[in-house]
Amino acid sequence: MRWALVKVSLAVTAMVVIAFAVPLGLVIKEMARDRAFSNADRQAAAIGPTLSITADRDPLERAVGSTQAGAAGRMAVHIPASGEPGALPVEIGTRRAARADLHTTTASTTEVPGGWVLLQPTAISSGQIALVEVFIPDGEVSKGVTTAWLVLAAVAFALVLGSLAVADRLGARMVRPAQRLAGAAHELGEGKLGARVPEEGPPELRSAAIAFNAMADQVVQLLANERELAADLSHRLRTPLTVLRLNAASLGEGPAADQTRAAVEQLEREVDTIIRTAREAKPQTTAVGPGAGCDASEVVRERMDFWSALAEDEGRKVRVAGVDRPVRIPVARPDLAAALDALLGNVFRHTPEGTAFSVDVHNGDDAVIVLVSDAGHGISDPEAAMARGNSGGRDGSTGLGLDIVRRVAESTGGDVRIGSSVLGGTEVRIWLGLDPHGIGPRERRRGHRGTERRRSRVSVRAR
């Protein structure tokens, strides 16, 4: 593209220069010719007063010699013979014109070898017509033309070079963003997901750069979503694995029991490996569009029916509150079930047998709070536990369970808090907003402070 612009600029500038330089050169040549003939005509007219007074040779020779052309030997005067007997024509200077041309009665120019001759008729005192001949050499006719043409050619050449330089800079300004765009596309194709293009250059290339960056961001987000989905699905396998582990622990002793427990432990390790491998720093946004809501009370009752059987086997006391009435929330049913399974699975995994736990649902005007509490040993560093990939001190945890819960809450404009429960252990409080579309991204980013301000305006009642 760059060389194409240079070639186009060269062609256009060359045509413009030719269109102006050639006529201008011809005009310069014609002006030099007119200047030479005008000068000769003035010198011929300078002899007129002398011829009107006298036709004698001596005065005329002195008059001719006083002119520039006469002093250079380029002027001649031709006086015809008078009508007196024995009179002869008078010629002063060197004749270069043909004799046939000496009978003209009007001013004229004639080409002769080595130049041109100007013939100027002039009336003399005897009533006859004398001819003043001025020779104009070819060098006089073309005097200064070569220099003017050289200057004109130099100016034209400079204009062409200047246009090429400007076209090259403009081409580089257009090509450089295009090259960066192509390079970034190659890098993205090679798997370098951080490749981006500076949004600069002509408006069209800026638009292309903006579109490319948006596409690259979308590709990164899609890949992150795939990793998150793999990690979430793998984490959901922990629920049946927890059941298998608890059942395997009650098998007693023997080779078959040991093999079963070893298989369950190996399966848990493989699932943990999948979770750690698929885990990626960028979170996935949970869809909360139309049709994605569910009844939180129904989901809590369903999941507690499942976990209550295991709790009974381990001697755990279970309490459920606030699920006697429907509570609609803008969260997909599988997402809420996954979040509850992640929290309840952590209770079974990280607390001793016989530890009590409870699930409470509180319904407010514009928010729903789900509390999962246990009577275990608690979490020493809640902030570290909420950090993605950090187990918060819980051995064997990938830290993804709390991240699943956090993303579900943030998808509604809410958040997750970890604190101390009334049972003496850990309390995970999930704040679910009922109007996620009315909460802007800036308010979501304010985190807990924005959430606390919203909570101060919400009257939450226990169901």
Image (cartoon, helix red, strand yellow):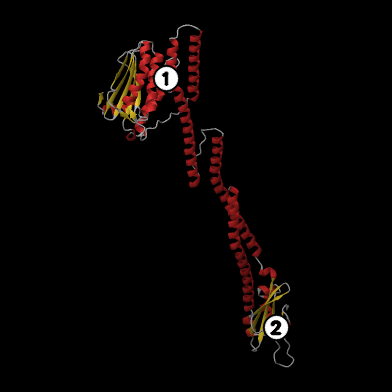
Q: Where, quadrant-wise, is the C terminus in this rendering?
A: top left
Q: Which residue is outermost to the right? A: 86
Q: Is residue 202 visible?
A: no
Q: Is residue 156 visible?
A: yes
Q: Secondary structure at mark 2?
A: helix
Q: Nearer the viewer, residue 154 or 374?
A: 374
Query: Residue 239 has which mark?
Result: 1
**Residue beneath the point at 37% across and 28% down:** 333
Residue bearing mark 2: 102
Q: Position of residue 115 (x, y in %)?
A: 70, 72
Earlier sequence position, callout 1 versus callout 2? 2
Q: Give, as a three-letter code, the residue at label 2.
A: Leu
In the image: residue 45, left or right of residue 321: right
**Residue beneath the point at 45% across and 21% down:** 237
In the image: residue 350, left or right of residue 89: left
Q: Position of residue 129 (x, y in %)?
A: 65, 86
Query: Residue 172 has which mark?
Result: none
Q: Which residue is outermost to the bottom? A: 85
For the residues marked 1 and 2, what is the alpha-carbon distance in whole angstroms?
129 Å
Q: Position of residue 82 (x, y in %)?
A: 70, 90
- Foreground mark, 1 or 2, reads 1
Q: Nearer the viewer, residue 375 or 61?
A: 375
Q: Position of residue 27 (x, y in %)?
A: 60, 67
Q: Give, as a three-letter code, the residue at label 1.
A: Thr
Please identify the quarter of the rendering in which residue 424 is found: top left
Q: Nearer the viewer, residue 357 or 314?
A: 314
